[in-house]
Amino acid sequence: MSSTELEVFAVCAADDIERGDARAFSLSRVTEAGENRPFPIVIVRTHADGYFGYVNSCPHEGIWLNFGEGNFFTPDRAFLKCGRHGSTFEIETGLCIDGRCKDKSLEPIALAVVDGDVCVCGVALVEDHGVPNPFDELDDTMEIMIHPD
Ligand code: FES
């Protein structure tokens, strides 16, 4: 794959995540130096059927959001929250609106839904078992959802 092509990796079936829910994935990415690094992410599916992806690491101390009880959300499920200290984040922007990292943001990940799969875009991931990415051929048919910063 040349550096000008968009890297797209399928992570899960879109329907594997219920509306109003989220799932964490422990992926590995390839750094520019060619080394593999852990890449934990969370993908949220909203009630309005939007998908939002973030690195699963709170800006305060890097704790994963679902730390502890495994919950990603505030009790009313209106916001994401840090499982350790309770900072709350807007689901659709990743902005922390209350807590120890107020005004900082989760690191967004560009997602696309391709043929019923949620895919991570623009990040070189380590593929399992060397299986080629089935979406390498698709480059102009995807609906890319890139978050505002
Ligand atoms: S690690 Fe999330 S608020 Fe402290």
Image (cartoon, grey):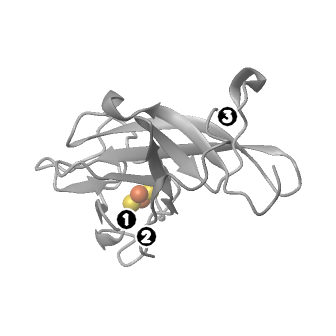
Category of crowding for the residue at label 1, using alpha-carbon neighbours closer than 10 angstroms: few (below 14), some (14–19), many (at least 20): many
> From the viewer's perspective, is the residue at label 2 or at label 3 nearer?
3
* Kind of residue at badge 1: Gly
- Could you tell me which residue is drawn at 10 percent across and 50 percent down? 76
Q: Classify residue 76 as left or right of residue 59.
A: left
Location of mark 1 (residue):
94
Name the residue furthest left. Answer: 76
- Say which mark, if any, is on residue 133: 3
Q: Nearer the viewer, residue 120 or 106?
A: 120
The mark nearer the N terminus, 2 or 1, is 1
Q: Quadrant of ligand 1?
A: bottom left
- Could you tell me which residue is drawn at 29 percent across and 52 percent down? 50
Total numbered labels placed on residues in the image: 3
Q: Nearer the viewer, residue 110 or 108?
A: 110
Contact, mark 1 vs mark 3 (Cβ under 8 Å): no
Contact, mark 2 vs mark 1 (Cβ under 8 Å): yes
Q: Between marks 2 and 3, how big is the CA–CA gap?
A: 30 Å
Name the residue furthest right. Answer: 33
- Could you tell me which residue is drawn at 55 percent across and 48 percent down? 120
Q: Between marks 1 and 3, how big is the CA–CA gap?
A: 28 Å
Label 1 residue SS: loop
Residue 71 rendering spot, x and y as whole percentages: 29, 39
Residue 24 rendering spot, x and y as whole percentages: 44, 37
Judge whether 148 appears above or below 22 on screen: below
The mark nearer the N terminus, 1 or 3, is 1
Q: Classify residue 60 as left or right of residue 3.
A: left
Judge whether 114 appears above or below 121 on screen: above
Residue 85 rendering spot, x and y as whole percentages: 34, 55
* Kind of residue at badge 3: Asn
Label 3 residue SS: loop
Location of mark 2 (residue):
105
Q: Nearer the viewer, residue 66 or 99?
A: 66
